[in-house]
Amino acid sequence: MTKPKTKKRPAAKAAGPKRSGAKTKRRSAGPPATIYSPDEIGEMFRRFSIQRPEPKGELEHVNAFTLLVAVVLSAQATDIGVNRATRALFEVADTPQKMAALGEERVGEYIRTIGLWRNKAKNVIALSQALIAEHDSEVPDDRDALTKLPGVGRKTANVVLNMAFGQPTMAVDTHIFRIGNRLGLAPGKTPEQVEATLVRVIPEHYLRHAHHWLILHGRYVCKARKPDCEACVIADLCRWPEKSCNSPAPLVELQTP
Ligand code: SF4
């Protein structure tokens, strides 16, 4: 999963909160507001839910531990590239004990095709050892505990909490960050701002799957360089000034991701 480029200027005009230390004193504000009404947001997610009733992540895994490892490996890498490396790795090491026993060097041999593999191999071994020592070899279902593990940040923890434990978290990757800003759905200068707004404005009953719907929408339709607005089911609702289509694509369940 690739990291959002936080330096990119958001397309939406909503201003982000000023950093403390700014010369002019302003009242502290929360994350910038969405430009959509609750009804419009509900309608967007209703359509996404029809397109993909049971959306799945594309990182291959066999249990919560292998999901955690796959997400750690996916930083600045594609899911396809991670899957290619982890298929063989997870066949020999699908528990913290087996992974720790394999050792850093052997893990490195399996994941050598993934960027930053040396550091990632180190983290995979360290987090396996921490799970054994501090969590009875189980992946904790708690954000604070997860983010204390080596190589695990807030985004990784959110993915694991969502996919392994069904929690309504929002892991903001590069696609969600772009959509939040491009559409004005959740303008923000940081992934945390976008996350906070999305969690606040998406209807609760859609939150469980919203993370996957937005990632898949960003990966296959609302793409970075040339969004495929003609294939977009929310084209009529979208307020991006540069969209190339105003009519929504037919609303049917998709067979592909
Ligand atoms: S209309 Fe275009 S820009 Fe708007 S959400 Fe759809 S694909 Fe993205």
Image (tube, rainbow, N blue to C red):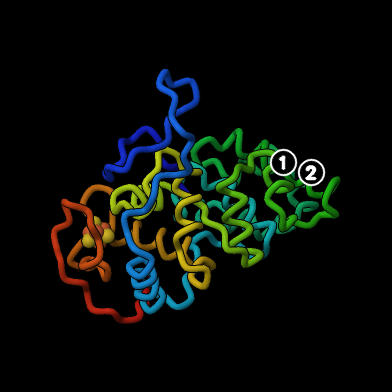
From the viewer's perspective, is 244 left or right of 120? left
Query: Looking at the image, which residue is at 52% across and 68% down?
Result: 204
Q: Are marks 1 and 2 in contact (CB under 8 Å)?
A: yes
Q: Is residue 231 above or below residue 153?
A: below
- Would you call the spot at circle 2 few (<14 residues within 10 Å), some (14-19), or many (20 or more)? some
* Residue to which mark 2 is pinned: 130
- Would you call the spot at circle 1 few (<14 residues within 10 Å), some (14-19), or many (20 or more)? some
Question: Element type at marker 2?
Answer: helix
Query: Looking at the image, which residue is at 28% across and 79% down?
Result: 251
The amino acid marked with disc number 1 is Lys
The amino acid marked with disc number 2 is Ala
From the viewer's perspective, is 99 left or right of 184? right
Q: CA distance from mark 1 to mark 2?
A: 9 Å
Q: In which image quadrant can residue 52 be found?
A: bottom left
Q: Is residue 1 above or below residue 236?
A: above
Q: Is residue 62 above or below residue 29?
A: below
Query: Looking at the image, which residue is at 31% across and 54% down?
Result: 35
* Residue to which mark 1 is pinned: 148
Residue 42 % position (x, y): 39, 70
Specify the quarter for ligand 1: bottom left
Mark 1 vs 2, N-terminal side: 2
